[in-house]
Every structure is written in C-alpha cells, then in structure tokens.
Image: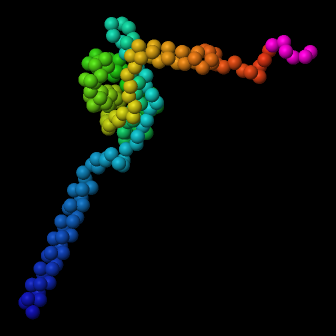
Amino acid sequence: MVKMAFAAIWIAAAALGSVYYSFNHAKEVASKPNQPSLFGGLDYLRTGIVSVPLFKDGRVYGYFLGRLVYTVEPEQLAALTLPAEALIIDQVYDYLYANPDIDYHDKANVDLTRIKEGIRDSINERVGRKLVHDVMIEQVDFLSKSDIRDNTIRRRTSRLDTGDGLLGAPDPAADHGGGGGH
C-alpha cells in the first residue's frame, strides 16, 4: 500500500511539474517579439524603373537605371500618410545624388550591397522608424552619355537602312498623286 501511495504522489508531482514547465515556456515564447522571416509577414513594394542622372564636374556623365523591390511591414506601410512609392523614390534620388562615394565609372568597384543598405537606411531615417527591412535589386544598369549617344545613332541608322526614315514608312494607301480619274 505504501508503494502505491508513493507511485501516485510521484505521478502527480511529475504531471504538475510538466504542466508548470509548459505554461512558463509558452509564456516566454509569447512575450518574445516575432521577427518576420523573408517568407512571411512582410509585403513587397516594387517601384518602376528609376532613372537618376549623375553629375561630375557640373555635367551629366551618365544615368543610373534601376528597378528595386523593398520588403516592408504591412502595418508600417498602412501608417504612412503619403504614398510609399513617392517617398521611396524621393529617397533613392536623394541618396544617389548626394553620395559622392559612388563612382559608376569604376564598375568593378561599385558595391551594390552598400548602395542597397544606404538606400534602406536613408528611407528608414526619413520615416523615423524601420519601414524598409531589405532592398532587393530586380534590375540595375548604368548608361554613360556615350552609350546613349551610340544607341541613338544606331537606332536612327537602322531606320534609314530599312527605308522607314525618321517619320516611319510611307503609307501606300495614302497615294495623293494625280493617277485617279476625276
């Protein structure tokens, strides 16, 4: 009989201990703030192509073209009083214009990670809280003035070679000649 009473007390103590541990562990997990993962909890804000003219010695030397995607918390995005895309594009322009450390001529040393972090930090600083968690590059290009000039010349000469001219191909149905019988 003593063995039976001891076994009952031991089972009750083990059950109470496991319930107590489970309750305290669940309370600790609930009190920790959830960190959003890259697969859930964040919205993705995609902007159009941003074209930023870049200056050196008072002259335009090229254009930074980029399409970026931003991961943002939906609650923070909903709390904004102005359109998020306008705010973000404004900060991208400010960051790329005001940053003398970025030299697009030296393409081998352009640090895209630093540019993305700088854009993210610039947006978050302006908003005053952590709105943007990450900046991802969908497309990025740098076109120098000579690249643009070469492409324009190539496009014009290809139109002239096909007979289209600069205004397009002549319309054969619009014959305004004197061949009709009035």
Q: Which range of residues does the magenta coloring cover?
A: 177-182
Q: Which residue is found at the position 41% from the left and 13% from the top?
A: 146
Name above or below for residue 154 compared with residue 40: above
Residue at the (35%, 17%) spot, across then down: 97
Q: Where does the image place residue 79, in percent across and percent down from the top left?
A: 41, 37
Q: Name the quadrant of the N terminus.
A: bottom left
Q: Is residue 79 visible?
A: no
| Scheme by which the image is coloured | rainbow
Residue 68's spot in the image, x, y percent?
Answer: 39, 32
Residue 179 covered by magenta stretch: yes
The answer to whether one can see residue 65 in this image is: yes
Question: How many marks are shown on the rendered structure?
Answer: 0
Main secondary structure type of the part rendered in magenta: loop
Can you tell which quarter of the image residue 130 is in? top left
Q: Residue at x 29, y 29 (%)?
A: 112
Q: From the image, which quarter does the C terminus lie in?
A: top right
